[in-house]
Image: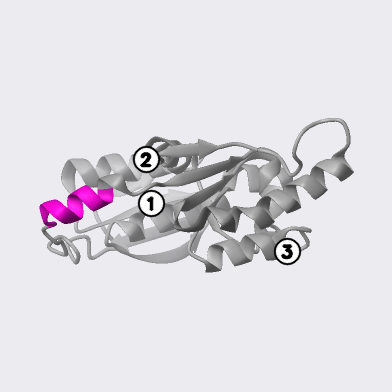
């Protein structure tokens, strides 16, 4: 068992991820463990820590899970020096983030709002390669479940290369975490970072 253990039970999103981020940035341990008590945090921390080059093993413990992260130095030298031309190309690349906070568009009639949302998502491919990320929060997460009327549209967008981030706290609040059928469970740190990195944010 790693000597370093973070007890992130009873911490609200995105605190468990932020605690892992702080530990990795301050000391970059070769291995550490994290105690968690909810499914959304487990998915968020697993994805974040894996993205930092660690392999993650999950153990069931009383009241939740222990995630054991190891091999932290495995990707430490996995880097590439970019040429000035590549850097300029990256800077010019357009990244459109679509921020959706409801399962309908507008107010007045939810049936109409649902139809408008379906049409909106079906039209997003017109953005082409500029469509970078779709963020679903609050009622917007209901669009990502398996019986959603727009699940096919979202799956097509994801297959075409758009990243879909679905708020884990929101899924948990509505009791639909297990019903998610598209996208990655995310946290508020990812949401804020996405809006910061985007060249344009669209909110229907």
Instruction: Check contact, mark 2 vs mark 1: CB within 8 A.
Output: no
> Can you say whether 35 is above or below 201 in the image?
below
Q: Which mark is residue 3?
A: none
> Can you say whether 145 is above or below 37 in the image?
below
Q: Position of residue 194 (x, y in %)?
A: 43, 42
Q: Position of residue 185 (x, y in %)?
A: 54, 53
Q: Earlier in the sequence, mark 3 or mark 1?
A: 1
Mark 3 vs mark 1, foreground winner is 3
Q: Which residue is mark 3?
A: 146
Q: Residue at x 56, y 59 (%)?
A: 183
Q: Residue furthest front?
A: 126
Q: Residue furthest top?
A: 108
Can the viewer see residue 14? no
Q: Earlier in the sequence, mark 3 or mark 2?
A: 3
> Can you say whether 145 is above or below 110 in the image?
below
Q: Earlier in the sequence, mark 2 or mark 1?
A: 1
Q: Residue at x 75, y 39 (%)?
A: 105
The reply, left or right, for residue 13 in relation to residue 50 is: right
- Label 2's element? helix
Q: Position of residue 125 (x, y in %)?
A: 58, 58
Q: Position of residue 119 (x, y in %)?
A: 74, 52
Q: Which residue is mark 1?
A: 34
- Front residue of 82/61: it is 82
Can the viewer see residue 68? yes
Q: Residue at x 35, y 40 (%)?
A: 19
Task: State yes or no: residue 41 in magenta.
Answer: no
């Amino acid at each position: 068992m790693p000597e370093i253990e973070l007890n992130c039970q009873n911490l609200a999103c995105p605190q468990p991820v932020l605690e892992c981020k702080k530990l990795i940035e301050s000391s970059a341990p070769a291995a550490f463990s994290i105690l968690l008590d909810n499914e959304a945090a487990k998915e968020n921390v697993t994805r974040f820590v894996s993205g930092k080059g660690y392999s993650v093993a999950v153990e069931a413990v009383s009241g939740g899970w222990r995630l054991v992260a190891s091999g932290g130095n495995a990707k430490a030298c996995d880097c590439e020096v970019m040429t000035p031309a590549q850097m300029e190309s990256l800077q010019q690349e357009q990244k459109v983030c679509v921020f959706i906070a409801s399962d309908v568009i507008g107010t007045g009639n939810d049936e109409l709002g649902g139809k408008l949302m379906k049409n909106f998502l079906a039209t997003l491919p017109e953005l082409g390669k500029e469509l970078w990320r779709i963020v679903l929060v609050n009622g917007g997460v209901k669009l990502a479940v398996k019986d959603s009327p727009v699940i096919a549209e979202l799956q097509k967008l994801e297959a075409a290369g758009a990243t879909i981030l679905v708020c884990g706290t929101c899924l948990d609040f509505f009791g639909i975490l297990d019903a998610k059928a598209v996208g990655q469970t995310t946290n508020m740190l990812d949401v804020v970072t996405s809006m910061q990195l985007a060249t344009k944010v669209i909110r229907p």
